[in-house]
Image (spheres, grey):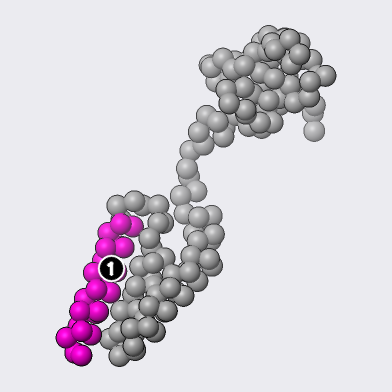
């Protein structure tokens, strides 16, 4: 029985180390929650709690950490992430370069040095060249815009 317990202790320790290595390699908060569960299970094993209790504690602690701490961690860790072109354009005010007419499927604008196909948010809206528009969405490779109005 003591030999079996030592194998379980080693298994929890190996799992804990493996999960920590995965976390270090990925740097994306992927396995730290399960590492916390493995640590609690390892401590319970050392205290002599039966295997069923260890497994239950591992699962409970992992899910509790995931549910309650992940939103906080995601909000405050890696906050200096640079937006991609896609994310950075939404909400931006742009100048129309070619008449935007959804019915005739025309419209173009240059944003940050790149040409984009532009479509109006509603089909009955027509935007003339040099008008300002606000990007409200991106659909595939097309900017979806509405006429700019000062707020």
The magenta stretch spans which residues?
1-23
- Helix, strand or loop for disc 1: helix
Residue 149 in the image, given as x and y percentages of width and height: 80, 26
Q: Is 147 left or right of 43, judged from the image as shown?
A: right
Residue sitting at the far left: 3
Q: Is 5 left or right of 65, judged from the image as shown?
A: left
How many numbered marks, from 0 up?
1
Quarter location, residue 145: top right
Residue at 35%, 79% (x, y): give it: 41
Dominant secondary structure, magenta? helix
Quarter location, residue 90: top right
Quarter location, residue 15: bottom left
Q: Could one spot residue 51 in this view of the protein?
A: yes
In this rendered view, identify the residue nearer to me: 103 or 81. Answer: 103
Question: Per the image, is 29 magenta?
Answer: no
Q: Is 19 left or right of 151, judged from the image as shown?
A: left
Residue 105 in the image, given as x and y percentages of width and height: 70, 12
Q: Quadrant of the N terminus?
A: bottom left
Residue at 29%, 52% (x, y): give it: 25
Q: Quadrant of the C terminus?
A: top right
Residue 103 in the image, given as x and y percentages of width and height: 76, 13
Residue at 38%, 78% (x, y): give it: 55
Which residue, given by chain and number where applicable, does mark 1 sit on?
A: 15
Q: Is 18 left or right of 70, judged from the image as shown?
A: left
Residue at 47%, 42% (x, y): give it: 81
């Amino acid at each position: 029985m003591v030999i079996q317990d030592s194998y379980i202790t080693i298994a929890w320790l190996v799992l804990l180390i493996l999960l920590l290595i995965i976390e270090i390699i990925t740097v994306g908060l992927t396995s730290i929650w399960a590492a916390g569960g493995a640590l609690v299970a390892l401590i319970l094993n050392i205290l002599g709690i039966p295997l069923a209790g260890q497994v239950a504690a591992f699962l409970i602690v992992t899910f509790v950490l995931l549910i309650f701490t992940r939103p906080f961690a995601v909000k405050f860790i890696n906050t200096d992430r640079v937006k991609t072109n896609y994310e950075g354009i939404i909400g931006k005010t742009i100048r129309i370069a070619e008449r935007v007419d959804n019915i005739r499927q025309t419209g173009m604008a240059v944003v940050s040095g790149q040409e984009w196909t532009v479509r109006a948010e509603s089909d009955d809206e027509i935007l003339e060249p040099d008008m300002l528009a606000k990007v409200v969405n991106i659909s595939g490779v097309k900017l979806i815009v509405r006429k700019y109005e000062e707020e």
